[in-house]
Image: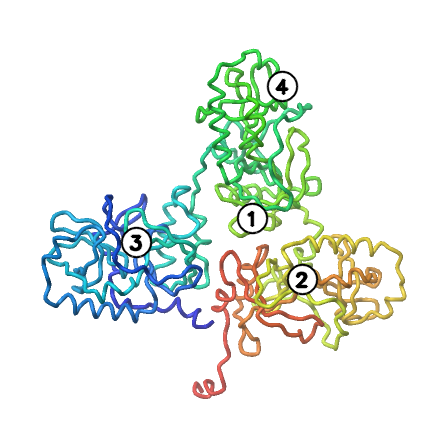
Amino acid sequence: MANIAMQKYWKPVAKEPVGIEHPQPETFLPDGQSESNMTHLSVSKGNVNTCMYKKPCVSKHKKEEVYASCIGGPNFFWCQYANTEELSEVSRLAQEAAHTHQDTTFLETLGPGSPCLALFSSDNEWYRAQVLSRVDDEFNVVFIDYGNECDINIKNVRSLPQSLLEKAPQAFLCSLNGFNESKGSWEDEGYDEFYNLLVDKQLRVVVIYTEDHSEIAVPQYAVEIECEGMAVNAAMQKYWKPVAKESVGLEHPQAETFLQDGQSESYMTHLSVSEGNVKNCMYKKPIISKNKKEAVYASCIGDPNFFWCQYANTEELSEVSRLAQEAAHTQQDTTFPETLGPGSPCLALFSSDKQWYRAQVISRVEDAFNIVFIDYGNECDVNIKNVRPLPQTLQEKAPQAFLCSLYGFDKSKGSWDDKGYDEFYNLVVDKELRVTVFNTEDHPELSVPRYAVELECEGVVVNTLMEKYWKPVAKECVSIEHPETETFLEAGQSESNMTHLRLSKGNVNTFMYKKPCVSKHKMEEVYASCIGGPNFFWCQYANTEELSEVSRLAQEAAHAHQDTTFLETLGPGSPCLALFSSDNEWYRAQVLSRVDDEFNVVFIDYGNECDINIKNVRSLPQSLLEKAPQAFLCSLNGFNESKGSWDNEGYDEFYNLLVNKQLRVAVIHTEDHPEIAVPQYAVEIECEGVVVNTLMEKYWKGQATDHALAKSL
């Protein structure tokens, strides 16, 4: 892995400079960009001939080692194989062929799509090319082993021998998978960032699918890119702006803003609802199932306990919109507004775009209505002249948005830090999300259901990220609070971010819990529940259903009649229940050491430890002993502490990389921890598309061998 770490300091020299130089004749500028980082093909818009070169030797779902030889943007760039043996052979043959006797009549037949040899003026070398367009004796060509293009005079074009036609191109046209330009656009900074991420670096690409480019007779490959342990596709998501087909939910009209403590009006939308009773909702319920993930956008954001999600698949929404415009422009029954009151369905005109949308009345004062747009979630004040009756066909279609709250944050049991509102808005606005519904309740003021959901955005669980802004901490807090009693300091560290076990040095009893359900080389979704350092941390499963069940059983068992004689037998390794003082809840534990009536225990479903008095210890029933631990002790694979040590900054960096983030871990090997009667798993960690093991290499100081040390002395 040290090889990977050193790659960033290596500057490969391109054997052929075509793809690196980005010649000025072929540059173009997206809005807000400089010429320094953009190259593109000025292709003919007309039909092109069939490509006569072979297709590149690229297989789907197989990793290829490449360099980006020509970078236009995230949706148009060329990759060249890192292994350049074949390229060198092609280059040698090209020079030979160009200097042999030529049949000049072939030039008359050259047109878009024709293969040829072309002279690159910057180095006076000949390269394989394909004609993109021709005007008289001027050709625009693409160098098919590099990807950049150039304007060439007819005198600098040669015929291509069969031997070179049969060799597959050494570069291939790519686009970044997951970013369809018909469904969004890049922020200006995205182009610079993409260029800087790729240029002069060895990359690993995986082809997801292939399509023919609309203007060049070559295939274009949608790829996933890994660079220096980082997933480039994930890193680029923050620069992508998806285009909403319908804009009601995104505009956040000023008329509907309200203020939470410490917030500005610029980004908050909410319903100013009537406090009185409202009529039963006559719309169907949204089509959403518990525990099933839905792809959505946040169409209206009030706060973490009040926001609306709209389905990402907008086919049904488009149909609803079409029917709404038709219905609004048909002959109307003017008597219908007299019957409208809270809860009534209707059509309402949205003033910002002069379009009609399905709505539901929240309150009415004479001829002024306050309504909610039920396919988006934002609300508006509407005059009676801008309200229409809703036909049966539109009433029968389920709403395309649904009211949500962030699961795990009951406002009756806590409140949000002021910063939490800004953070939540920024986390979810204009991003595709995946939501999972955990439970449903009727909103107390609106006649619509509200869904308690878990949100996932760009591979991160939003609920977890938001925990730091919640006051007080949730009951399941053992792994979050990191009580002061269990902290310790590595060199150069502060107490704020380190938790560890103060272990008994003596022998411990045989471990009586089952082993965690972890398989080698199988990815597990987890959180770091207790972080000591790269060689000592605990991971807890992200799926907490079993953990919730264990917690429920633990509370029941702790309050049942106890046999106090069992306490006399407790010693290192013994399983038990222990009270965690910060939340007065009972958790499964294992004794690490005992001095008279004081125990030091580890909470085996979380990993952190605590000093406990004998009065706060209970026996563990067989039902809880048989359930596997919900957390497991880990170390970062590839860093043996007998062969090196960590820089002081490494501990802080490791903590910040893991804390409060959903991780994916793969177990490489297992060994028994020398001081705790639990297995310790050496793992590879992926976080937000980044391989943590790779990132941490720069903080590792390997020890010199005796031979190297002797030489240095």
- Crowd tier of the residue under label 1, counting other residues whose Cα lies within 10 Å: few below 14, some 14–19, many 20 or above: many
The span from disc 2 to disc 3 (Cα, nearest Å) is 50 Å
In this rendering, position of residue 137 left or right of residue 484: left
Residue shown at the point (74%, 71%) measured from the top left: 511
Q: Is there a contact, CB below 8 Å, between mark 2 and mark 1?
A: no
Asked which secondary structure carries label 2, the reply is strand
Amino acid type of the residue that numbered disc 3 sits on in the rendered structure: Val
Residue that mark 2 sits on: 631
Residue that mark 4 sits on: 341
Q: Position of residue 497 (x, y in %)?
A: 60, 60
- Crowd tier of the residue under label 2, counting other residues whose Cα lies within 10 Å: few below 14, some 14–19, many 20 or above: many
Q: Is there a contact, CB below 8 Å, between mark 4 and mark 1?
A: no
In this rendering, position of residue 574 left or right of residue 5: right
Amino acid type of the residue that numbered disc 2 sits on in the rendered structure: Ala
- Crowd tier of the residue under label 4, counting other residues whose Cα lies within 10 Å: few below 14, some 14–19, many 20 or above: some
Q: Is there a contact, CB below 8 Å, between mark 3 and mark 4?
A: no
Residue that mark 1 sits on: 456
Amino acid type of the residue that numbered disc 1 sits on in the rendered structure: Glu
Residue that mark 3 sits on: 218
